[in-house]
Image: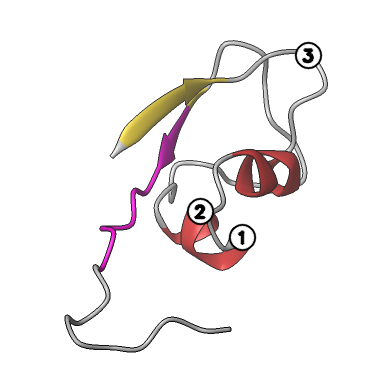
């Protein structure tokens, strides 16, 4: 899990896009945020990391 320090202009939606994380997972990882529409500068937001799943061997490449 990563930690992002909120800067001016940050929103949970923008952070979800930046870190390629579903917005609902970002909200669920941060129960301390009472109002997901309001972030305070300097607030620490937990960014869930998703494990990279390798493709199974022997799968043909897509043309």
Question: For the residues marked 2 and 3, what is the alpha-carbon distance in whole angstroms?
Answer: 18 Å
Say which quadrant the C terminus sits in: bottom right
Magenta stretch: includes residue 27: no
Q: Which residues are magenta?
A: 45-53
Q: Are marks 1 and 2 in contact (CB under 8 Å)?
A: yes
Residue that mark 1 sits on: 23
Q: Secondary structure at mark 1?
A: helix
Query: Observer-nearest residue: 43 or 57?
Result: 57
Measured from the top left, where is residue 48 in percent x and y?
37, 49
Query: Observer-nearest residue: 39 or 55?
Result: 55
**Residue 8, disc:** 3
Question: For the residues marked 3 and 1, what is the alpha-carbon distance in whole angstroms?
Answer: 19 Å
Question: For the residues marked 1 and 2, what is the alpha-carbon distance in whole angstroms?
Answer: 5 Å
Residue that mark 2 sits on: 26
**Residue 12, disc:** none
Q: Are marks 3 and 1 in contact (CB under 8 Å)?
A: no
| Residue at point 52%, 84% (across, down) | 62
| Residue at point 39%, 52% (across, down) | 29
Asked if residue 9 is positioned above or below residue 17 in the image, the reply reads above
Q: Residues within 10 Å of mark 3 (few under 14, many from 20)?
A: few
């Amino acid at each position: 899990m990563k930690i992002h320090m909120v800067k001016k202009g940050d929103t949970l939606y923008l952070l979800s896009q930046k870190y390629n994380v579903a917005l609902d997972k970002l909200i669920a990882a941060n129960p301390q945020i009472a109002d997901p529409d309001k972030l305070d500068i300097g607030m620490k937001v937990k960014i869930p990391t998703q494990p990279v799943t390798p493709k199974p061997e022997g799968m043909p490449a897509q043309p």
